[in-house]
Amino acid sequence: MSNTIEIRVPDIGDFSDIPVIEILVSVGDPVNVDDSLLTLESDKATMEIPSPAAGVIREITVKLDDTVSEGDIVAVLEVTEEAKQTGQTDRQADQDEPPAAVVAASEPESKSPLAAAKAATPVQAVINAPGAASTSVPYASPAIRRVARELGVDLCQVTGSGKRGRIVREDVSAFVKAVMSGSAGSGSGGFGFDFPELPEVDYSRYGEFERTALSRIKKLSAGHLHRNWVSIPHVTQHDEADVTDMEAFRKANAEEAIALGFKLTPLVFLIKATVAALKKFPQFNASLDRDGETLVLKKYFNIGIAVNTPAGLIVPVIRDCERKGIMELAAEMAEVSGRARENKLKPQDIQGGCFSISSLGGIGGTAFTPIINAPEVAILGVSRTRMMPVWDGSEFKPRLMLPLSLSYDHRVIDGAEAAYFCRYLASRLEDLRRLTL
């Protein structure tokens, strides 16, 4: 006993005419309930279309690079009683990974291996080495596919250790480590450098110790941070801003902010000054395209703010900062930071940033080198203010100085441009009237 059903694109919100970037099954393949059939990718999100029932694929009505919208037919499924029962059993046994989901957008992989290697970072160029991939479709959840795309990992090269060969996060991590050590991919340690392997250490020889697992956020961040540090030529420009008058203004308006239910922090003034500097120097509000030869200049101003949470560092994005006043930004900062610490951020809350700010002013320090949050090309680090004697031409006066550390991508930004950017940003902090110009 069997019947066929048409599989249609489900409700995908306001998206339409979305390109098909992956077809994960072939005609004749058996599928279970919620198995991913194909992947769609808009400029904002990646979505995998699941099977609504267990059965056998009898027809696929789309091909790669076709565009689809809600309600479009993408496949025809033959459903049998036996397949239904098998699918339900498998589904119950396979709850270790979520079914189809909407995940953060990432660049679609190039169809040409040569083009992919040319456009990729050093990490990606090795991991996606031509000729190394299998022809079988990898079995992985949308979240794992997203992580793999961001790290440049070809899942066809990864062996899954989950149920029925499903690729899990640990498999991707192990593959990246193997490439780094030179035991996978091409030679030279996987990154074009001849790094010796880390030695095995017997820590018990030196005293008592314990092992503690990294938090989930730190595990997720590790690959991104390593990729960004290895693939981007970082240079850090250090400067100082006299924020004596700014701090006096902030304190004078602090009670009004508290009455409205939030704190007026120095960070909101930094956001406004940064937006002013990004308008003056648009190459900082940009991304280097995958071809490595084109600069994508952005006309919007979304600022990422690093928030320290119990689980690790998260960078939620404050959008349209050029349209918001100081108090509005302060209220939004308080709300977003609170949700970040409570682990209640949505995927869109951490997407679409143009430039990031990492403030350690509440902790201490005089300077540091923040790692650029690719595909951004610069990040501003802020350390603790300190009272210093400043010569005004006739005498030394006590002034409150704010240390600034600007890390920038030297492929896009020259040293002189970075110095001008820092000086301009400092001038806006030193005279708040200039923020309205």
Image (cartoon, rainbow, N blue to C red):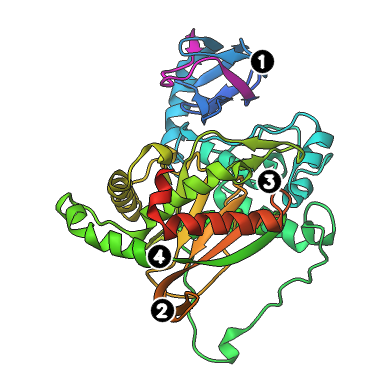
Q: Which residue is mark 4?
A: 243
Q: Which residue is mark 2?
A: 397
Residues in magenta? 1-21
Q: Is residue 318 above or below residue 368?
A: above
Residue toward you, 366 or 402: 402
Residue under the image location 58 percent in, 54 percent down: 421
Q: Give the number of the disc on residue 158.
A: 3
Which marked residue is nearer to the observer: mark 2 or mark 3?
2
- Amino acid bearing label 2: Lys
Spatial separation of the CA atoms under disc 2 and disc 3: 63 Å
Q: Residue furthest front?
A: 394
Q: Is residue 57 above or below residue 96?
A: above
**Is the residue marked by circle 3 packed among few (<14), some (14-19), or many (20+) residues within 10 Å?**
many
Q: Is residue 231 above or below residue 105?
A: below
- Decide which of tag 3 and tag 1 comes sooner along the chain: 1
Q: Which residue is mark 1?
A: 63
Which marked residue is nearer to the observer: mark 1 or mark 2?
2
Left/right of residue 362 with respect to residue 287 in the rendered view: left
- Amino acid bearing label 4: Val
Marks 2,3: beta carbons within 8 A: no
Element class at badge 1: loop
- Decide which of tag 1 and tag 4 comes sooner along the chain: 1
Name the image quarter holding the C terminus.
top left
Spatial separation of the CA atoms under disc 1 and disc 4: 58 Å
- Amino acid bearing label 3: Val
Spatial separation of the CA atoms under disc 3 and disc 1: 25 Å
Left/right of residue 231 with respect to residue 306 in the rendered view: right
Which marked residue is nearer to the observer: mark 4 or mark 3?
4
Spatial separation of the CA atoms under disc 1 and disc 2: 71 Å
Residue toward you, 389 or 99: 389
Spatial separation of the CA atoms under disc 4 and disc 3: 52 Å
